[in-house]
Amino acid sequence: RLLVKAYRMHIGKRFVGQQIQMDRSIEDIRSAKDARMIDLIKSKDEQIRILTEQNHELTSSLDRAEEELTACQVTKATMTKENRALREKNCHLHAKTESSEGHINSMADMESQMETMSTKNAELFRLLEQEEENNEKVAS
């Protein structure tokens, strides 16, 4: 009996030693797992920080692009308005030019008619002078 008891104690110590070693291994595994989780969380936090920073930069860039777009739209609207005004002025000047050309053509016709009348008047005056000369010769 004593021998059996000693044997059981020996096996029990050995089992307790294995249990202690097993408990340490589980603790090491848990500790390693916790360390990996902490590293993973740190890595994810860093990724979130980087993405947040990039998101902020992209948002700022988008805001600037929208401001430039708005400025371009305002400039385009102003230029469109100026272009319309210039087209209207051009049409007005075109009509005025056509009117002036018509007036010039009319004046040229009048000038031609006046030349013809002047020539006829000169001829009539010459004929009148000849008639007066003939009348003076007949009267003398």
Image (cartoon, rainbow, N blue to C red):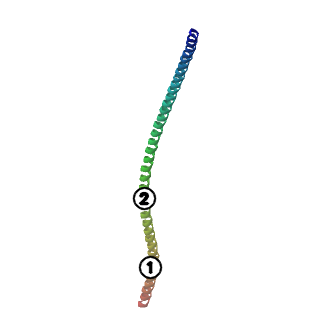
Q: Position of residue 44 (x, y in %)?
A: 50, 31
- Which residue is at the front of the view, 109 or 72? 72
Q: Quadrant of the N terminus?
A: top right
Q: Position of residue 88 (x, y in %)?
A: 42, 61
* Residue drawn at x 45%, y 36% as measured from the top left: 56
Secondary structure of the residue carrying numbered label 1: helix
- Hey, what amino acid is under mark 1? Met
- Which residue is at the front of the view, 5 or 128? 5
Residue 67 numbered mark, or none:
none
Q: Position of residue 119 (x, y in %)?
A: 47, 79
Mark 2 nearby-residue class (10 Å; few <14, some 14–19, many ≥20): few
Residue 117 numbered mark, or none:
1
| Left or right of residue 90: residue 16 | right
Secondary structure of the residue carrying numbered label 2: helix
* Residue drawn at x 44%, y 88% as measured from the top left: 134
- Hey, what amino acid is under mark 2? Arg
The residue carrying mark 2 is 84
Position of residue 111 relative to residue 68, above or below, is below
